[in-house]
Image: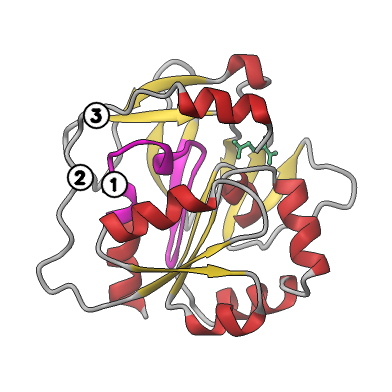
């Protein structure tokens, strides 16, 4: 992430929302984080807090070893280019096609989309969710903001969502479950389609692990 993003993150005061306890029947699941670029360490920490075993993924053998995968926030054009250079695009599509649970935050949401608005030239995505995502939809770096949102399935307590050069879901197909909208704009910012979960914001940048708990539970159920 650019230095300006890092500054924004480090000034972040995480809300004191309690983390959801890992499920009582917590079978051990290995959750990978695609570690090419972006806020990998924050997701690794959140996976541990949600009761999963984290693993960084840069190679096919590492991808083969995980039960589920998170694509982090960062810069989707860079993640896409590095995934191509590391020969991971084909294996990622194969494993997603075979049902591997995936979660993408921000740039990760962009990577999971089927269609993009403001797509960089030749930028490819993985097509895990039948949705059109608009990159940088809420504006540029200076327009980054935080907002209290309600997330379906995460309890009634609001979730403090951090938006950094965030996308939104411009259009979602009929099979896509809408989990959250950003209150000021009404735009869709969290979705799930079967094995795939995506948020336009960065749950990994707070101490509230409810989204990671939802994903870790999905991995337990589906893998
Ligand atoms: N705007 C970035 C992109 O297009 C995403 C920003 C983020 O992940 N914080 O990839």
Dot 1, crowdedness within 10 Å: few (<14), some or many (≥20)? many
Ligand 1: which quarter?
A: top right
The structure residue drawn at horizontal position 78% and vertical position 35%, both measured from the top left corner, is 118
**Helix, strand or loop status at disc 1:** loop
**Helix, strand or loop status at disc 2:** loop
Q: Is residue 50 left or right of residue 91?
A: left
Tell me residue 163's x, y (percent).
51, 28
Q: Is residue 220 left or right of residue 137?
A: left
Q: Is residue 155 magenta?
A: no
Can you identify the residue that label 3 sits on? 158
Q: In this view, does 219 lie to the left or right of 121?
A: left
Q: In this view, does 146 lie above or below 29?
A: above
Dot 2, crowdedness within 10 Å: few (<14), some or many (≥20)? some
Q: In this view, does 146 lie to the left or right of 64?
A: left
Can you identify the residue that label 2 sits on? 19
Can you identify the residue that label 1 sits on? 209
The structure residue drawn at horizontal position 45% and vertical position 21%, both measured from the top left corner, is 11
The tag earlier along the polypeptide, 1 or 2, is 2
Give whichever of 212, 200 is nearer the camera. 212
Tell me residue 80's x, y (percent).
75, 56
- Whole-number angstrom distance, CA of label 3 to CA of label 2: 12 Å
Look at discs 3 and 1 and give the one toward the viewer: 1
For the record, the magenta segment spans 189-213
Is residue 136 among the parts visible in the rendering?
Answer: no
- Whole-number angstrom distance, CA of label 1 to CA of label 2: 5 Å
Q: Is residue 144 above or below residue 23?
A: above
**What count of labels does the image hold?**
3
């Amino acid at each position: 992430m650019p230095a300006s993003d890092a500054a924004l993150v480090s000034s972040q005061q995480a809300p004191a929302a309690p983390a959801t306890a890992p499920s009582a029947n917590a079978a051990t699941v290995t959750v990978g984080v695609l570690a090419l670029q972006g806020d990998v360490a924050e997701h690794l920490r959140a996976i541990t807090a949600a009761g999963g075993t984290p693993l960084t993924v840069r190679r096919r053998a590492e991808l083969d070893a995980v039960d589920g995968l998170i694509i982090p926030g960062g810069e989707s054009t860079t993640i896409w280019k590095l995934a191509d250079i590391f020969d991971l695009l084909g294996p990622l599509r194969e494993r997603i096609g075979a049902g591997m649970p995936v979660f993408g935050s921000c740039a990760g949401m962009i990577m999971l989309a089927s269609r993009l608005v403001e797509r960089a030239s030749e930028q490819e995505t993985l097509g895990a969710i039948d949705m059109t995502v608009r990159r940088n939809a809420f504006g540029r770096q200076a327009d980054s903001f935080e907002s209290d949102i309600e997330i379906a399935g995460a309890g009634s307590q609001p979730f403090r969502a951090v938006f950094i050069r965030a996308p939104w879901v411009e259009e979602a197909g009929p099979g896509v479950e809408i989990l959250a909208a950003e209150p000021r704009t009404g735009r869709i910012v969290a979705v799930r389609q079967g094995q795939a979960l995506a948020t336009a914001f960065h749950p990994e940048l707070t101490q509230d692990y409810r989204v990671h708990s939802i994903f870790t539970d999905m991995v337990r159920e589906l893998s």
